[in-house]
C-alpha cells in the first residue's frame, strides 16, 4: 500500500515520490504528520520605516529604479519605496526575464530578512511577487516552513500537505482519544489544521516543539500514549512466553562464593535477590541492572549465571567489544575456578580452528558458558539449551543483533531469561519510557574502601608541567592512563593521535615504562599491554578509548584525558571509572584547549563537581537529549516525532495511565494508535 495514496495527489510523480520516501513519507497520513519546523508571518505588511536589521517581514513596495551591475560582481539592485522610507532589493543571481519584469514603476510584495549596509536597509534575494493595484498581499494564516528533500520546494510541500489533509478520511482514520483523556482540548483534525496553518497572531514559540499550544500538546500526548500502549502490550506479551525456572545451587554457585574475595555490598545482595526471584519464575526475566562504574555488576551477573549453570542449562554472556569480552572471560574464569574449563570465548578474533572447537563443544554441552561479542549470534552458532542471556552495555548493540541472540534458544516453546547490565546510568525519565518493558535494578553503592576521585580541569598550555608531575608520581609507584584525543569515529585517525602522543611521551618516560593500547592491535597484543600495565612493567598506558569499559587495574590511580572537551559526559565518566578501583587516592585530569565553548565548559564542570553517575546522566540528557545518549538508531528506542522525553516529562505519568486503560478497555484502539505512530518499531524494544 505504500505510495499508492501519494500517487493520487497532483504533482507527485516518480521523482517526487522517491524524494518524499527518503523523508519517511509513504502515504497521506505521513504527509499530515510531517509538521512544520518553523513559520513565517506574512499575515500583515510592515512599513519600511518600521523595519529593523534582522527582521524577517512582509513589505509592499514600488520600484523607483532598477540597475544591473557587473563590478565588483554581477548583481541587480532595485531602489524601492513604500512612501514611508526607502529600501534596496539586491539579487546576485538573476536571469534576463527578471530584468525585464523588475522595471521602475512595478509594484512588489517581498518577504525576506532585512540587513543594514552602507547604502541603508536592504533585502537580499527575498521571495517576491509582482502585484497589481488593489491586490491584497497578506496571507490568512502563518506560513509553515518544512524540512524538505532537495528538489521539493516549500510551495510544493505546502500544497501536498494541504491536499493530504483534505483528502484523508478523518472519520475512519482518526481515533477518539478524548474519551479516555479529558485533558485533550481539540481533536486530531483541528490540531493538524492549527499546526499546519496557524491563525494570525498565534505565538510562534507556543506552537513549535516545546510550546504549550493545545494543538502541539494534543499531538505529543497522542504519540506518548501510543508509545506507552506499545510498551504495555510488549510487557504483557513477554509474560505470555514460557521460560525454565532456574533455582538450583551447586558447584558453579559454590565456586563463585569461594573465589570472590569480598563480601557483597547491601546493594549487590538486594539486586541479586531480585534476579533470583525472576529466575525462579516460569516466565522470562527481562531485567536491567544499572550500576555505576566499579559497583560490582560482574559478580552479580556471575551468581545469576551460576543458577542457570547449576540447573544444567547454558548461558551466553555478550559484550560489545573484543577487549571487554576478553576481560569478562578472564573475570569469569577466576570466579568459576574448577568449572572454568567449561567456559569458552568466541569473538571475531577467534581462529577458525578455535571457533570450530567452541561450536562443537557448545552443541555437545562441553561448553556451558560462552562469552563473546557479536560473533555469538552469527550463523552456525548453536546452543543446546540456552536459558539465560547476559548482555553488557546493551545500548552498544543493534536491536537486530540482540533479537538474533534471543532466537538462538533451540526451543520453540520457551524463551531465555535476559539480564542486561549497564554502567551508563539511565535517568528515571528514560527508564520509565524507553525501558518500560523491563524491570530495573540499581546497584547504588560502591564497594567499601573506595575513595572519591579528585577531578580537575587543566588547559593544554599546562601539559608539560602535568607530565613532570606524573613522572614524579610514577617514581613513587603510581600508574597513569593517558587517553588520547578523540579525532572522530575513525580508527585510523585515532590511531595516528595515539601514536603521536606515545612517541611524544616516550621522550619523558624511559621506553620500558610506557605502553600503548589501541583498537588496531591484535587481541593477544592488547592483552599483553594490559598485563604489563597490571604487573607494573609499564607505569603509563597511552590509549584510545578502548579502555573505556572492562579494563580493571585496581592500583591505577591517575587518568589524563587529552582534549576532554571533545568527549561526551557519559564517556568521560566511564573513562574516569578506570581509576579509583582500589584503596589509593586517585586523580583525573581533564586536559582541554585553552579556550573552549560554553557547553564544553558546562560538561567538564559537571565532572569536577560530582561522581554521581545519575546526576551526570541527567545533565547529559539535558545537554544532548535522549536520542543521542541512547543511540536511538541502534537501541530499539523508538524515534519520537514530536516528543522529547526530557522536555515533556510532565506528561509521562498521565499518558502511561491513559495507555494502560486503553489497552484494557479497547485493545483495538491501542493497536490503531501503535500502527499510526510506531508501526513495526515497537517489536524491537524487547530485544
Image: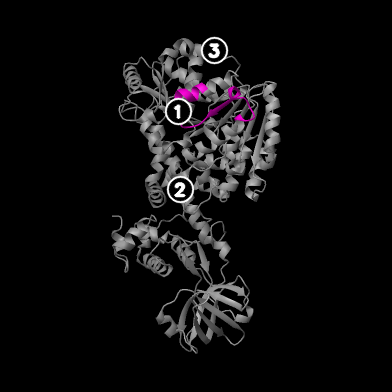
Colour style of the rendered protein structure: one colour
Residue at the image point whose x is 39% and y is 50% from the top? 669
- Please determine whether, in this image, residue 410 is positioned above or below residue 48: above
Q: Which residue is mark 2?
A: 639
Left or right, 290 with respect to 101, comes to right
Mark 1 to mark 2: distance in Å?
Answer: 29 Å
Provide the secondary structure element on which disc 2 rests: loop
Residue 331, x across and y down, in percent: 51, 19
The magenta segment is 506-528
Mark 2 to mark 3: distance in Å?
Answer: 44 Å
Would residue 276 be seen by someone viewing this image from the given angle?
A: no
Tell me which numbered mark, 3 or 1, is placed earlier along the sequence.
3
Residue at the image point whose x is 42% and y is 26% from the top? 372
The label shown at residue 342 is none
Would residue 56 be seen by someone viewing this image from the given angle?
A: yes
User: Badge 3 local density, few (<14 within 10 Å), some, or many (20+)?
Assistant: few
Circle 2 or circle 3, nearest the eye: 3
Q: Is residue 640 rendered magenta in the image?
A: no
Q: Which residue is mark 3?
A: 259
Residue 16, x across and y down, in percent: 33, 63
Q: Which residue is mark 1?
A: 322
Residue 330, x across and y down, in percent: 49, 19
Provide the secondary structure element on which disc 3 rests: helix
Amino acid at each position: 500500500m505504500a505510495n499508492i495514496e501519494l500517487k493520487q495527489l497532483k504533482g507527485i510523480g516518480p521523482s517526487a515520490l522517491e524524494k518524499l520516501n527518503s523523508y519517511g513519507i509513504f502515504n497521506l497520513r505521513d504527509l499530515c504528520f510531517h509538521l512544520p519546523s518553523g513559520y513565517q508571518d506574512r499575515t500583515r505588511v510592515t512599513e519600511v520605516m518600521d523595519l529593523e536589521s534582522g527582521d524577517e517581514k512582509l513589505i509592499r513596495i514600488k520600484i523607483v529604479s532598477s540597475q544591473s551591475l557587473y563590478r565588483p560582481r554581477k548583481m541587480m539592485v532595485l531602489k524601492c519605496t513604500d512612501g514611508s522610507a526607502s529600501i534596496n532589493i539586491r539579487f546576485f543571481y538573476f536571469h534576463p526575464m527578471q530584468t525585464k519584469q523588475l522595471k521602475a514603476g512595478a509594484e512588489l510584495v517581498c518577504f525576506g530578512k532585512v540587513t543594514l549596509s552602507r547604502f541603508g536597509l536592504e533585502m537580499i534575494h527575498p521571495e517576491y511577487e509582482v502585484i497589481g493595484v488593489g491586490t491584497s498581499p497578506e496571507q490568512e494564516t502563518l506560513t509553515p516552513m518544512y524540512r524538505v528533500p532537495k528538489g521539493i520546494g516549500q510551495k510544493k510541500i505546502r500544497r501536498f500537505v494541504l491536499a493530504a489533509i483534505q483528502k484523508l478520511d478523518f472519520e475512519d482514520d482518526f481515533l477518539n482519544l478524548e474519551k479516555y483523556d479529558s485533558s485533550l482540548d481539540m481533536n486530531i483534525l483541528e490540531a493538524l489544521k492549527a499546526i499546519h496553518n496557524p491563525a494570525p497572531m498565534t505565538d510562534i514559540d507556543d506552537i513549535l516543539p516545546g510550546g504549550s499550544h493545545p494543538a502541539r500538546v494534543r499531538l505529543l500526548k497522542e504519540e506518548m500514549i501510543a508509545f506507552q500502549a506499545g510498551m504495555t502490550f510488549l510487557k504483557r506479551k513477554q509474560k505470555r512466553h514460557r521460560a525454565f525456572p532456574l533455582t538450583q545451587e551447586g558447584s558453579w554457585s559454590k565456586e563463585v562464593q569461594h573465589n570472590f574475595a569480598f563480601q557483597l555490598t547491601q546493594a549487590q545482595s538486594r539486586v541479586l535477590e531480585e534476579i533470583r526471584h525472576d529466575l525462579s519464575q516460569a516466565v522470562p526475566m527481562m531485567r536491567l541492572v544499572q550500576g555505576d562504574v566499579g559497583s560490582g555488576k560482574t559478580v552479580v551477573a556471575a551468581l545469576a549465571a551460576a543458577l542457570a549453570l547449576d540447573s544444567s542449562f547454558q548461558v551466553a554472556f555478550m559484550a560489545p567489544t573484543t577487549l571487554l569480552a576478553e576481560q569478562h572471560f578472564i573475570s569469569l574464569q577466576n570466579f568459576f575456578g574448577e568449572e572454568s574449563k567449561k567456559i569458552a570465548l568466541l569473538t571475531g578474533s577467534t581462529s577458525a580452528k578455535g571457533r570450530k572447537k567452541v561450536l562443537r563443544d557448545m552443541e555437545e554441552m562441553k561448553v556451558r558458558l560462552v562469552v563473546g561479542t557479536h560473533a555469538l549470534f552469527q550463523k552456525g552458532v548453536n546452543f543446546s539449551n540456552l536459558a539465560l542471556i547476559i548482555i553488557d552495555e546493551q545500548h552498544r548493540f543493534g536491536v537486530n543483533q540482540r533479537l538474533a541472540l534471543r532466537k538462538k534458544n533451540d526451543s520453540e516453546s520457551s524463551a531465555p531469561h535476559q539480564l542486561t547490565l549497564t554502567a551508563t546510568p539511565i535517568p528515571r525519565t528514560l527508564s520509565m519510557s524507553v525501558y518500560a518493558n523491563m524491570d530495573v535494578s540499581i546497584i547504588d553503592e560502591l564497594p567499601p574502601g573506595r575513595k572519591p576521585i579528585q577531578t580537575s580541569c587543566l588547559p593544554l598550555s599546562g601539559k608539560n608541567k602535568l607530565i613532570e608531575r606524573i613522572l614524579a608520581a610514577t617514581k613513587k609507584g603510581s600508574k597513569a592512563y593517558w587517553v588520547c584525543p578523540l579525532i572522530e569515529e575513525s580508527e585510523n585517525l585515532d590511531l595516528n593521535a595515539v601514536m603521536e602522543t606515545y612517541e611524544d611521551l616516550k621522550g619523558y618516560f624511559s621506553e620500558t615504562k610506557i605502553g600503548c593500547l589501541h583498537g588496531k592491535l591484535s587481541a593477544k597484543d592488547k592483552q599483553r599491554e594490559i598485563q604489563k600495565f597490571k604487573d607494573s612493567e609499564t607505569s603509563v598506558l597511552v590509549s584510545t578509548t578502548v579502555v573505556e569499559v572492562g579494563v580493571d587495574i585496581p592500583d591505577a590511580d591517575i587518568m589524563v584525558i587529552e582534549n576532554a572537551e571533545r568527549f561526551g559526559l557519559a564517556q568521560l565518566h566511564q573513562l574516569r571509572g578506570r581509576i579509583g578501583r582500589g584503596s589509593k587516592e586517585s586523580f583525573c585530569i581533564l586536559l582541554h584547549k585553552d579556550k573552549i565553548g560554553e557547553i564544553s565548559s558546562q560538561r567538564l564542570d559537571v565532572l569536577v563537581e560530582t561522581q554521581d553517575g545519575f546526576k551526570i546522566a541527567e545533565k547529559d540528557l539535558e545537554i544532548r537529549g535522549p536520542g543521542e545518549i541512547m543511540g536511538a538508531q541502534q537501541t530499539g528506542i523508538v524515534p519520537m516525532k514530536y516528543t522529547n522525553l526530557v522536555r515533556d516529562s510532565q506528561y509521562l505519568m498521565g499518558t502511561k495511565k491513559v495507555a494502560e486503560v486503553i489497552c484494557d478497555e479497547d485493545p483495538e484502539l491501542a493497536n490503531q494508535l501503535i500502527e499510526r505512530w510506531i508501526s513495526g518499531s515497537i517489536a524491537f524494544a524487547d530485544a
